[in-house]
Image: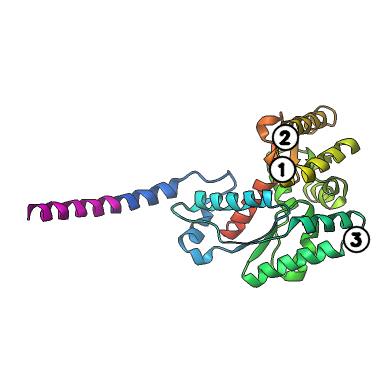
Amino acid sequence: MKYALLRGVVLISIFLASFVGCVNADNVTASKEIISDTMTSNASTACSNELQMKIIGIIGGVSWVSSADYYRLMNEMVNKECGDLHSAKILMYSIEFEKFSDEERLAETGDWSLITNTMNDAARRLKNGGADFIVIASNTMNSLADEIQENVQIPVLNIVDATGEKVNKSGIKTVALLGTTYTMEQNFYRDRLEKKYGLNVVIPNETERDYINSVIFDELCAGKLNNESREQFVEIINRLVDVDGAQGVILGCTEIPLLIKESDVKVPVFDTTTIHSEAAVKYALNMT
């Protein structure tokens, strides 16, 4: 009898402690530090009602190495904002990169038909799966963002816009751009940053561009991180700062943040993977 009575008291105590714990957890969640200075409490409605959280569609696999970071970052950001066991609602279509890299080489020669078909097919799959909007987990492939949005008729959050807004908020006016050869040399990225956001964009010289491109495809896309490559990237960035007047650097390839961190260089770093993920989470939580 005494044992049964004692057991009942213990169970009641556990229940009360759990109840208090839930209340305290809610208070902690309400006061929790948000993922960055741009994330606000406007997400509270979406957090309290899961059905109001938009479904993020990710075109991934270009490459899968950085796509894994997109998935991790988005879930961490939603959890940071909403607390408890909340996570992001995500659909990802991961493209097979070996075949895609062949299509990229054709695109470099001017034939964009295959790669465009692949990207549009991925977007349609995401829309049909229930995605409310799409992010393309590749800086280079955001050159097709406007076309894809027109084809699938759901929003595509352009990584260039997210990055341009972030740089503008920092007050930096001259920024270096590192990425694939296509991203650095073609107009879709630089022109958008310069004309829409009033930035002065500087890029590496031809030898440096070729080196950066080879590291991206031969090493980073295969998950290989080499200290020698990191040192060379830092040297390139420092030259762009000292000679060309760059006040910050855009890591305009979603694999480069795997290699270069802000602590490696002497100017602010704009990590496009993190910036794009943050923009997607804000949109999914109705914060924009």
Farthest residue to the top: give it.
242
In the drawing, does residue 108 fall left or right of residue 217? right
The residue singled out by tag 3 in the image is: 111
Residue 219 percent location from the top left of the image: 75, 42
Corner quadrant of residue 130 = bottom right
Say which of marks 2 and 3 sits in front: 2
Q: Secondary structure at mark 1?
A: helix
Q: Is residue 199 visible?
A: yes
Residue 220 percent location from the top left of the image: 73, 43
The residue singled out by tag 1 in the image is: 167
**Residue 111 forms part of the magenta stretch:** no
Of callouts 2 and 3, which one flags the residue occurring earlier in the amino acid sequence? 3
Of callouts 3 and 1, which one flags the residue occurring earlier in the amino acid sequence? 3
Q: How is the image coloured?
A: rainbow
Observer-nearest of 178 and 117? 117
- The region drawn magenta spans 1-18
